[in-house]
Amino acid sequence: MKTMPPVARRTEYIKPFYVMDLLAKARALEAQGRSVIHMEIGEPDFITPEPIIQAGQAALAAGRTHYTPSLGLPELRQAIADWYAKRYGVSVDAARIIITPGSSGALQLTMSALINPGEGVLMADPGYPCNRHFVRLVEGVPLSIPVGPGTAYQLNAELVEQAWTPKTKAVMVASPSNPTGTLLDIEELGRIGAIAGERGGALIVDEIYHGLTYEDQAQTALSVCDDAFIINSFSKFFGMTGWRLGWLVAPEPYVDALDRLAQNIFLAAPTLSQHAALAAFSEASLAILEERRQEFARRRNYLLAALRELGFVFAVEPQGAFYLYADCSALTDDSFRFAEELLEQAGVAVTPGLDFGANQPERHVRFAYTTDLNNLQEGVDRIRAFLDRR
Ligand SMILES: Cc1ncc(COP(=O)(O)O)c(C=O)c1O
């Protein structure tokens, strides 16, 4: 009798997003004619700015359908280097910039180039769930450090110093963070980089939500730690999630290994997307993106105040991304059930804390303001009515 080989053990560690179940339920409700307000979606509701779409269409019309070099289109790598100079006043050699299929590709490359089996990567909990999985995929050990409002839900030098062991290879942070939207102070980031450096480890900084900050503009970690691995993407600020395009800024000595990994893992990032992204830094695109940033700011301000009135607690004001990570412990002791009931009884979808780690997930839910103000207002009305009925 024929038997199939078992699925590889490493897949046991790769968890699904719980919110996907919720999303499936939301879709089923919508198919029955129920209306659902989506506050769980982690991508901008806006479509890609028109100048970028036009550049993509022009590239397609011109037959630009072949592979690019594995490290990416030289013009795009240079355009990103110019962006660092213009936006942050930081000089980066384009030779250190690697174009990847989304920042997901950059994360996979970074872990593959840095982490040996058994080596640890420090990261904040709550945090972006895929990070643990990228570490697992290369047989490394994700070392989650619980963080809370006391450190704005971010790691700091003290926490990193305490947690570092001889087996630790890297520390990874995201600023602004998903799910909390909080920034890591740039001086503190410099101190974390220094600790990693003193111990022969690396600092990995996910800057994917740069551009989406509502008070101060975020500064790149490169300004305080030139040998950090910087992860970024065209997905969020540039509104290009479906184009699958991101980048990595790596220290020069790693570029050769990263090039070989890129050649073998994905060969090159999508060609059309790279041509389209050349238009992302144009004045016309940046003007559209600035309007959208202001719209996100209006949504954030509205939703933060409205949710506070309903009894959700935000001990730290999120400064960026498009998320609000709410302490809902005054309203429920089981955020997962709360999210399910909110969907079924009120038609509002949010992400339960469980998706972001093991640090008090039962007391948290994440709201995404990736839907317009009318929808957010309707969502808040529904949540209010739901809470009143309980
Ligand atoms: C913190 C963070 N990093 C990376 C990613 C991956 O995004 P992409 O592969 O679209 O660049 C996401 C997506 O939600 C994210 O929230």
Image (cartoon, helix red, strand yellow):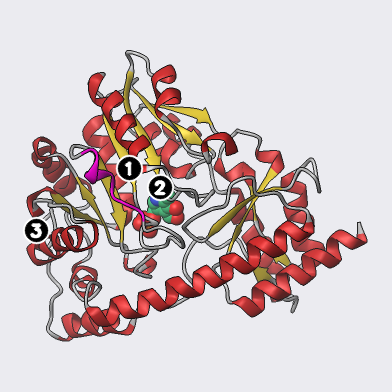
- Find out whether residue 384 is within the magenta segment: no
Q: Nearer the viewer, residue 86 or 196?
A: 86
Q: What residue type is disc 1 on?
A: Val
- Residue closest to the far top: 166
Separation of marks 3 and 2 at Cα, in angstroms: 30 Å
Q: Disc 2 marks which residue?
A: 175
Q: Disc 3 marks which residue?
A: 69
The magenta region covers 218-225
- Residue closest to the far right: 389
Q: What residue type is disc 3 on?
A: Pro
* Res 338 label: none
Q: Is label 3 or label 2 in front?
A: 2
Whether pointer 1 and pointer 2 mark residues with C-beta atoms closer than 8 Å, the reply is yes
Whether pointer 3 and pointer 2 mark residues with C-beta atoms closer than 8 Å, the reply is no
Q: Quadrant of ligand 1?
A: bottom left
Q: Does the rendering let one see residue 202? A: yes
Q: Would residue 76 be found to the left or right of residue 289 on screen?
A: left
Location of residue 328 in the rendering, given as x and y in whole percent from the top left corner: 73, 47
- 255 lies above or below 271: above
Q: What residue type is disc 2 on?
A: Ser
Does the beta carbon at disc 2 come under 8 Å from ligand 1?
no
Q: Disc 1 marks which residue?
A: 205
Question: Which quadrant would residue 218 be assigned to in this image?
Answer: bottom left
Number of marks in the rendered image: 3
- 7 lies above or below 382: above
Location of residue 244 in the rendering, given as x and y in whole percent from the top left corner: 32, 63
